[in-house]
Image (spheres, rainbow, N blue to C red):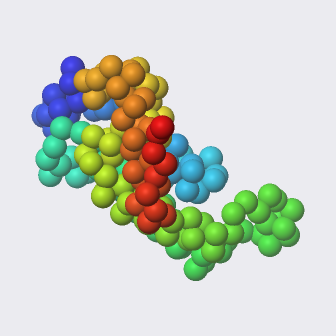
Amino acid sequence: MAEGDLIRAAKAGRREAAAELCSMHWQGVYRIVYGRLGNRAEAEDVTQETFLRLWRQLARFEGDQLGPYLRTIALNLCRNRLRDSYRHPQGDLREDLRADPGPSPEQRLLDLEREEQLRRALARLAPDQRRVLELRLVEGRSVAEAAIALGRTPEAVRALQYRALIRLREIVTGTPGEKEG
């Protein structure tokens, strides 16, 4: 069943459709959240909260793809979690000193700012280039899976991804990319 059909079925109250949508997107959302927070327990909590918010708002959702919507919810929850942890640190200071510190709150905020810059750069890509990067790099799909989702051959997906990365580099750095000879 296509994702749009599953969304409509979930809106109609079919639990199996909601479960299938969840299984389709859970791992991709978790990867995004874990990449931002760097803590498995927090990533699991935020991923779960992402889907809870989706189900609460599903009746208002219009569209045939949940991926971008879920990413927005997840990233907003990550920002809130990082902001709150920076403002209200919790836990035992001695335990925190013994633990692996990971990235500092400042570094995580800088990472979020870089992510926002990258998001703006991605928005400037052609839609097919943006979509191939979302599928391959954000969602972690294989070339074969991306080819099916895009209705292209695997070779076309590889070429599209290459051109998208070159164009993204041009946008981010403000310099023209290398020309193949």
Viewed as shown, does residue 38 lie left or right of 49?
Answer: right
- Counting from the top left corner in percent of width and height, residue 65 is at 24, 39
| Residue 172 in view in this figure | no
Query: Residue shown at 64%/69% (left/top)?
Result: 107
Choose between 169 and 146: the one closer to the eye. 169
- Counting from the top left corner in percent of width and height, residue 135 is at 39, 36
- Counting from the top left corner in percent of width and height, residue 56 is at 26, 51
Viewed as shown, does residue 22 lie left or right of 112?
Answer: left
User: Where 146 falls versus 101 (above or below)?
Assistant: above
Query: Residue shown at 69%/63% (left/top)?
Result: 103
Kindly indicate the quadrant of the structure image that contains residue 163: top left
Query: Residue shown at 62%/47% (left/top)?
Result: 40
On-image quarter of the N terminus: top left
Query: Residue shown at 46%/26% (left/top)?
Result: 142
Choose between 153 and 52: the one closer to the eye. 153
Choose between 164 and 130: the one closer to the eye. 164
Kindly indicate the quadrant of the structure image that contains residue 139: top left
| Residue 160 in view in this figure | yes
- Counting from the top left corner in percent of width and height, residue 33 is at 51, 51
Viewed as shown, does residue 13 lie left or right of 68?
Answer: left
